[in-house]
Image (cartoon, rainbow, N blue to C red):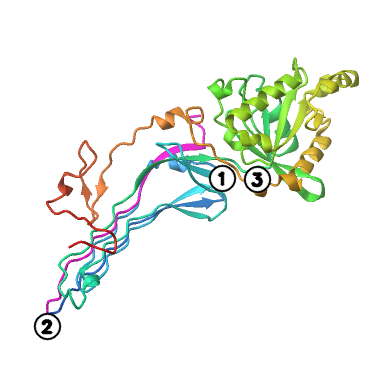
Amino acid sequence: MADSNFIDYVKILCRSGKGGAGSLHFHRAKYVPKGGPDGGDGGRGGHIILRGNKNMWTLLPLRYRRHIYAGNGQAGSAGRSSGRDGEDQIIEVPCGTVVFDAETGEYLCEVTEDSQEIKLLRGGRGGLGNWNFKSPTNRTPRYAQPGEPAIEKSIILELKLLADVGLVGFPNAGKSTLLSSVSAARPKIADYPFTTMEPQLGIVEYRGNRSFVMADIPGIIEGASEGKGLGLRFLRHIERNAVLLFMVPADADDIKAQYEILLEELRRFNPQLMDKQRVLAISKCDMLDEELKAEIRPHLPTDLPAVFISAVSGEGLIELKDALWKAITDDANRTEEMPITHRPLDGHHRVREEDEFIFENVPALDEDDEFVTLDDEGFDPDELPDDTDYEWEYGNPEP
């Protein structure tokens, strides 16, 4: 996957901007002996904002942009002049991107619509200048607020493809062949396991100029929840699908047993997948005659519709489309009424090479947009706190 352009999991470090300090200044003019306080407010720090982009299909741009820092707010100055706000950083992501805390694995938010914006990290508020604290009993306030500090967080972005139908099956079950037969997608097809190494999308045409989207993911095997094969890394892409199409080849020893194995792996990944509509397709049925099909039917699962298909000869594809369209348009199964419960990331759902990625210290910018040097501990030696203790609550400063 290192050479693939399809990246669906990336870990980045984000930091919002810190707020600028308020100004402690008194007006001085030749003919104004007691001008009074006129210190301006500091500017707010920049935000870290996520924005959905329907024209993106991968997280590849973020793979080479590991550190995203928003601008710091500028300090206030004399004459009630407010400092400049820090520059916001907008991270464009594909629709269907989910955000997790990299440290705890906790679900944070998701972007599902084009141009949808989510404020991931809020910039620090700027401090108030001493002009705000003057009163009839305190005409010369000799204090101002410092700006609020920045927020730094390491996050994980997961892309979950948006599709109507998701294909689930063992390797070499005929999923890619079916997708290439019913849509214009051209996935790689070969006779060895795990030919499909990344998810594929295809648009399937239906009657009356209607269509639906079908997603093909790499095959899973028994024990995938423990990391066997390709593990459960790509099962996230069927969490948003309205219908799950299970594919079992006709030459399988026990079709119902293989279906139960696939169902159990999905349950271990996310129990909510059990609530989705399911359809079973017995592929490669061109090697069966009617007598063999009649022998197989009594041993099929009875809790879902089953269709015999052959992507090579085209047998059963019309019946399969009808069954899928009926399941997709079922009012009781609409995706809008079935919100996804995103499970927290654990050891089975993480990508090892991303979690072991080391964030290197890079030069940072100070308030004057000049580079400062960070020592081995990650802070600027020139910004050590002085003897003054700033114990204050925003809007209620302590002198």
Q: Are marks 1 and 2 in contact (CB under 8 Å)?
A: no
In this orientation, which residue lies closer to the viewer: 137 or 252? 137
Asked if one can make out residue 219 in the rendered structure from this viewpoint, the answer is no
Magenta segment:
1-30
Classify mark 1: helix, strand or loop.
Answer: loop
Q: Circle 3 sits on which residue?
A: 338
Q: Circle 1 sits on which residue?
A: 96
In this orientation, which residue lies closer to the viewer: 275 or 396? 396
- How many C-alpha atoms fall within 10 Å of the one at disc 3: few (<14), some, or many (≥20)? some
Q: Are marks 3 and 2 in contact (CB under 8 Å)?
A: no
Classify mark 3: helix, strand or loop.
Answer: loop
* Residue at (24, 55) in percent of width and height: 369
- N-term mark: 3 or 2: 2
Q: What's the residue type where badge 2 is placed?
A: Val
181 sits left or right of 194 in the view: right
As drawn, the residue found furthest toward the right would be 291
Q: What's the residue type where badge 3 is placed?
A: Met
- N-term mark: 3 or 1: 1
Name the spot of residue 65 as percent of width and height, x first. 39, 42
- How many C-alpha atoms fall within 10 Å of the one at disc 1: few (<14), some, or many (≥20)? many
Name the spot of residue 6 as percent of width and height, x first. 53, 36
Question: Does 37 lie within the magenta span?
Answer: no
Q: Circle 2 sits on which residue?
A: 32
